[in-house]
Amino acid sequence: MITSTSNKRIREVIQLNQKAKARRERDVFVVEGVKMFLEAEPEHIEEVYVSESVNKQLSEIGRQKLDAISAPCEIVSDEVFRKISDTQTPQGILCVVRQYHYKPEDILGTPDALLAVLEDIQDPGNLGTIFRTGEGAGVTGIIMSRHTVDVYNPKTIRSTMGSLYRVPFFYTDNLQETIEQMKKQKIAIYAAHLQGTKFYDDCDYRKPTAFLIGNEGNGLQEKTAKQADTYIKIPMAGKVESLNAAIATSLLLYEAARQRRQ
């Protein structure tokens, strides 16, 4: 059992939680909690850490998962686990998981494409929520500009509630170029925009569709918005000008999902 926070592997886990650079260099990320551990693909798990107290009361399902994976499992003292945990209430099990790598053609070439295209989203909770609700709505992929918050940020991962494992995604260094590739694939491009000429529920999303969603404070850059085929807006009552980026994305994706069920 590891009882010292100066242990080399423990220090590495702390760095992975705190620094995107460390995650990129090792090509891994950290997930915490029984749910995230159980849903992680065994072949993607590299290391597992279990607190002493949780190890004594781990469920049969959790124990079976531990026995089934080939990755090393370390028992650590509760004090050490509190140090490597990124939450105020540590859940007692944490694993280091290999990052996912999707190719643009895997996502853009889907015949029934339903895409969320995010430009410079900065809030980890927003990004995680978009993954979670996107999976629920049947999104086929999420595309992010290079300056969008790190998808492997611990707060983002918690907000996805496991959807990160299942929703294809990639970052693009040139969002405008990627949008042009989407057009070549006959994907209709809709920009969520305050100058929208149509309400979001007046359009037909049964064909391959992508929604452009801008930064929380500044919206879409003008050059990005101009690439859209149609500007759409969500009707607002009262003095509210716009919705939170994650909520707006959820409304658009679920409207597309509703139409596709009919």
Image (cartoon, grey):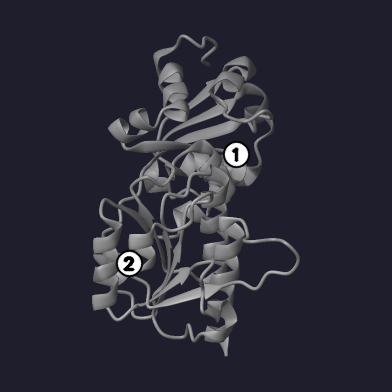
The residue at 57%/90% (across/down) is 262
- Mark 2: secondary structure: helix
Q: Is residue 12 above or below residue 238?
A: above
Q: Is residue 2 above or below residue 180?
A: above
The residue at 60%/69% (across/down) is 251
Q: Which mark identifies residue 33?
A: 1
Q: Is residue 177 left or right of residue 234?
A: left
- Mark 1 belongs to which amino acid? Gly
Q: Report x, y in % for residue 19.
A: 41, 28
The residue at 54%/71% (across/down) is 253
- Mark 2 belongs to which amino acid? Ile
User: Which of the 4 image quadrants contains residue 257?
Assistant: bottom right
Q: Report x, y in % for residue 229.
A: 37, 78
- Mark 1: secondary structure: loop
Q: Is residue 152 above or below residue 92?
A: below
Q: Report x, y in % for residue 45.
A: 41, 41
Residue 31 in view of the camera: no
Q: Which mark identifies residue 107?
A: 2
